[in-house]
Image: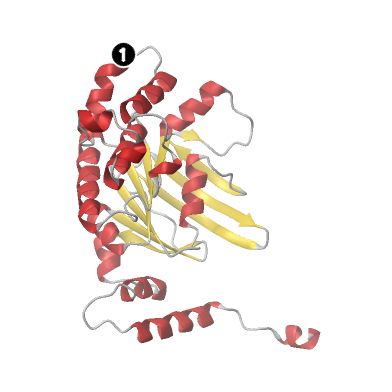
Amino acid sequence: MDEPTAVGAADPVLRVSGLRKTYGPVLAVDDVSFTLAKGRSLGVVGESGSGKTTTARIIVGLEQGDAGQVTVAGRDRTRSRRHGRAERLRRARDAQMVFQDPFLSLDPRIPAAAALRETLRLHFPRRDATARIAELLDQVGLGERAAAALPRELSGGQRQRLAIARALAVEPAVLVLDEAVAALDVSVQAQILNLLADIREQTGVGYLFITHDLGVVRWVTDDVIVMWRGAIVERGPTARVLAAPEHPYTRLLLDSAPRPGWDPGAVAAHRRALARAATPSPSPSDHRKN
């Protein structure tokens, strides 16, 4: 792969360099590098097992990479030393993550407005939270009734709006969205994607979209990287990559989306051929060992 090109600015808000992660014999993330500028949206695309979610979790600090560097808002996040409470909170403010299932991050016992108040109290204890809570709820399209509701009393789309509001409450430089609309109905997906586009325009936050859905990528990202078997196999402006993919795996992803005239048998054959091409042939010494 060519060296990664900075997206939109010489001083990116997120820089990932040479990231590597293994789980036993499995190489989950293999020399991954990219940048993201303030206010831009970058898609990270690949099927399950491609390494995209592991990459995201390392960026936000939920996992530790084996090698490489992650810098958010100019601050290195990859040093292994222990951090005090103040440093952990500051790192959390740099990069926030929105999950596919908001129940992973929402306390089922706390109403929506109270969840926002708790987040604000933790990160900005000297601020008056009341006005900011109202601003956040309005920003994500939640009214007074939703503000008083428990997570189980909200719809899936409302819960995801609340998760986004809570992430935005700390004013992050980067918002990582891991399959954030995958579990929603198509009509609700469109609402959330429109909401995210508006928020990006209003705040200048950088988005890192982790997804397998090329429709989402086409709708909300400026640039895209394609991951396969832990490595980046293609990168570039979203419109160019989706219109004229250069790597066989990117073409496979595009061919896998059902549409009129879609041939699942041809897609399966394409997948088998790609897997065979990626599997190294045994060397003569291997045959002699056997």
Q: Position of residue 241 (x, y in %)?
A: 30, 65
Is the residue marked by circle 1 packed among few (<14), some (14-19), or many (20+) residues within 10 Å? few
Q: Position of residue 221 (x, y in %)?
A: 28, 53
Q: Secondary structure at mark 1?
A: loop
Position of residue 29 relative to residue 267, above or below, is above
* Residue 15 shown left or right of residue 37 in the figure: right
User: Which residue appears farthest toward the front when viewing the image?
Assistant: 153
Q: Position of residue 136 (x, y in %)?
A: 26, 29
Position of residue 281 relative to residue 37, above or below, is below
User: Which residue appears farthest toward the right when viewing the image?
Assistant: 289
Displayed quadrant of residue 154: top left
16 or 201: nearer the viewer: 201
Position of residue 34 relative to residue 286, above or below, is above
Position of residue 284 relative to residue 29, above or below, is below
Is residue 119 something that shows in the picture? yes
The image shows a total of numbered marks equal to 1
Q: Residue at x 63, y 36 (%)?
A: 80
Q: Position of residue 58 (x, y in %)?
A: 52, 45
Is residue 163 something that shows in the picture? no
Displayed quadrant of residue 289: bottom right
Coloring basis for residues? secondary structure
Q: Residue at x 24, y 47 (%)?
A: 192
Q: Residue at x 23, y 36 (%)?
A: 140
| Amino acid tagged 1 | Asp
233 or 9: nearer the viewer: 233
The residue that disc 1 covers is 128
Q: Quadrant of the C terminus?
A: bottom right
